[in-house]
């Protein structure tokens, strides 16, 4: 299979899922920008007058016209949009907290209490997000990144998780 990019709906649902924040049930549609909207994106409200900014950035078709096929574009604005998007920031914080609470690799039998060491949290992040273990170079880069002081309101760990959420590996299926 050729490499392909997830649609914005698939990516948003995946981010909610890995953060442990996905509400799988349907119900009344909500705005995608609503901080309480944790439902799958397919249940989001679509306005024909003003398309949601996230959907618009990622090639969602115009709701007023028939679209046989969705175009796929890649631009720097897409990454910049995600790096500053409140939804991504909130989900990064939730995923970081989830990984810090996990005493052992997620999905396995946990033993012990407290925050696991950085190497275990990094490995957990890779398993949850990418379904694989990080290689030695990825762990080394992550540990070096985490040692630095944070220059924002987010912790260094939250910044790292945000970077993983908006990485190409999270956006593309090989």
Image: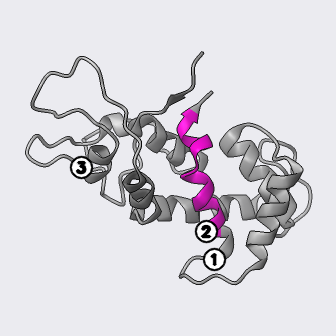
Residue 64 relative to residue 30: left or right: left
Q: Nearer the viewer, residue 128 or 151?
A: 151
Q: Which residue is mark 1?
A: 155
Task: Kindly indicate whether the residue at mark 1 contacts the one at mark 2 (C-beta within 8 angstroms).
Answer: yes
The secondary structure type at the circle numbered 1 is loop
Specify whether residue 73 is painted magenta. Answer: no
Specify whether residue 161 is painted magenta. Answer: yes
Residue at mark 1 to residue at mark 3: CA–CA distance: 29 Å
Which region of the structure is painted magenta? 158-172
The secondary structure type at the circle numbered 3 is loop
Image mark for residue 159: 2
**Residue at point 55%, 81% (across, down):** 152
Q: Nearer the viewer, residue 131 or 144?
A: 144
Q: Is residue 125 above or below residue 23?
A: below
Q: Nearer the viewer, residue 5 or 95?
A: 5
Residue 30 relative to residue 38: left or right: left
Q: Is residue 106 above or below residue 102?
A: above
Q: Which residue is mark 3?
A: 52
Task: Tell me where residue 103 appears, x and y as whole percent.
Answer: 83, 59
Task: Tell me where residue 129 appears, x and y as whole percent.
Answer: 66, 44
Residue at mark 2 to residue at mark 3: CA–CA distance: 25 Å
**Residue at point 87%, 45% (across, down):** 109
């Amino acid at each position: 299979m050729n490499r392909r990019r997830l649609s914005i709906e698939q990516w948003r649902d995946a981010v909610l899922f890995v953060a442990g924040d996905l509400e799988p049930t349907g119900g009344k549609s909500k705005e995608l920008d609503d901080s309480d909207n944790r439902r799958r994106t397919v249940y989001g409200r679509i306005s024909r007058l003003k398309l949601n900014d996230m959907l618009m950035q990622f090639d969602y078709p115009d709701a007023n016209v028939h679209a046989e096929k969705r175009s796929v574009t890649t631009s720097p604005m897409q990454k910049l949009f995600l790096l500053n998007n409140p939804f991504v920031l909130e989900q990064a914080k939730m995923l970081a907290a989830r990984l810090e609470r996990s005493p052992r690799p997620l999905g396995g039998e946990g033993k012990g209490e407290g925050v696991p060491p950085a190497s275990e949290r990094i490995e957990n992040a890779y398993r949850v997000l990418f379904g694989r273990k990080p290689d030695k170079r990825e762990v080394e880069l992550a540990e070096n990144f985490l040692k630095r002081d944070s220059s924002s309101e987010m912790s260094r760990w939250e910044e790292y998780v945000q970077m993983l959420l908006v990485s190409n590996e999270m956006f593309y299926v090989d």
